[in-house]
Image (spheres, rainbow, N blue to C red):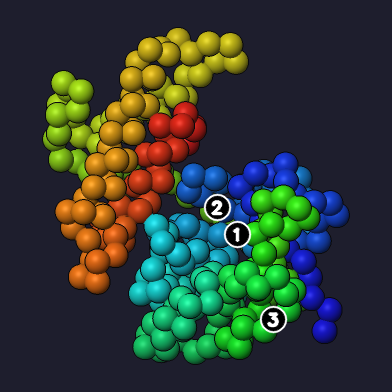
Amino acid sequence: MSLIEMQDDTNLSLLHKPVHAWAGYAGGLFPTWHPLDALFPDVPNKSIAVNDQEDADILDIENGDATPAQFPAWFRRQKARGLERPGAYANLSTMPAVMAAARAAGIKDDEYDRWVAHYDGIPELNCGLGEKAKQYTDHGYGVSLDLSVCDPSFFGAKSAPVKNTVHYDWFDETLRLVFGLARTEREQVELYDKLRAMQTPKLHPRRVQLAFLRQVMKWYAKRLDEVAITEQPNKDGSPSWGVDHRGWRRKQLWGRYQGRRFV
């Protein structure tokens, strides 16, 4: 069997040509699927959802993103929108939990594709989990580039992901005093996005206010660290990133603090 090399990275300049297949995020901090599709429209590809509310070919199951328990409902929603074989991405130690959650929900192993992350440097499907793809390194071609090998059947009919919305309703709506102003996390995020969308090629018309809001984003992100790690960890002592979308919110807030544009 001849395997296909698939590349993925949030920094598109790192992709190594020729690109035989690629994967891109449908949403989240780095929505790379659409720009990659414009660059390589005729190359086999997979779209990735970073949380269970997004639609895509593959659900990203790792810390701060989706959880194994969320996969069955996400799988059924993708099937309902016409996707033939929705899949799951997880590392070698997490994928068994994904499979157990799917079986408990009545989903058979052969109904979905598994993409396993196992950085052993060996470009072979050798994880023993019936995987169709394996991410075997995160330093391909001498740079910080994720490389996977895939069974040709991993790539079915091309299905462009829907445009995923910004989930403002996931942000905290508790009124808090931040730098002398009483606002909610959601209000501040929405205001940041509104101002960030006003950016001109040369100068932002409200750059001082935007700079202040970036510091507010940092304050909220650091507060989430304190809550998830110190104040309300899981029973086993691990950070409670899965509660109240904390992992997702933290990524979103840090992205805005770094000046990224989301809408």
Q: Of the residues shown, which amino acid type is indicated by label 2?
A: Ala
Q: Where does label 2 land, which residue?
A: 26
**Residue 142, position as x, y percentages in the image:** 76, 53
SS at mark 2? loop
Disc 3/disc 1 C-alpha distance (Å): 20 Å
Tell which circle, 3 or 1, labels the residue nearer the N-terminal end. Answer: 1
Disc 3/disc 2 C-alpha distance (Å): 25 Å
Q: Is residue 65 left or right of residue 159?
A: left
Q: Where does label 3 land, which residue?
A: 125
Residue at horizontal 29%, vertical 60%?
239
Q: Of the residues shown, which amino acid type is indicated by label 3?
A: Leu
Callouts 1 and 2 close, C-beta under 8 Å:
yes
Q: Of the residues shown, which amino acid type is indicated by label 1?
A: Ser
**Residue 259, position as x, y percentages in the image:** 47, 29
**Residue 124, position as x, y percentages in the image:** 73, 79
Q: Where does label 1 land, which residue?
A: 47
Tell which circle, 1 or 2, labels the residue nearer the N-terminal end. Answer: 2
Q: Is residue 154 depicted above or below 7 in this figure?
A: below
Q: Is residue 5 depicted above or below 170 in this figure?
A: below
Q: Is residue 204 depicted above or below 45 in this figure?
A: above
Callouts 3 and 2 close, C-beta under 8 Å:
no
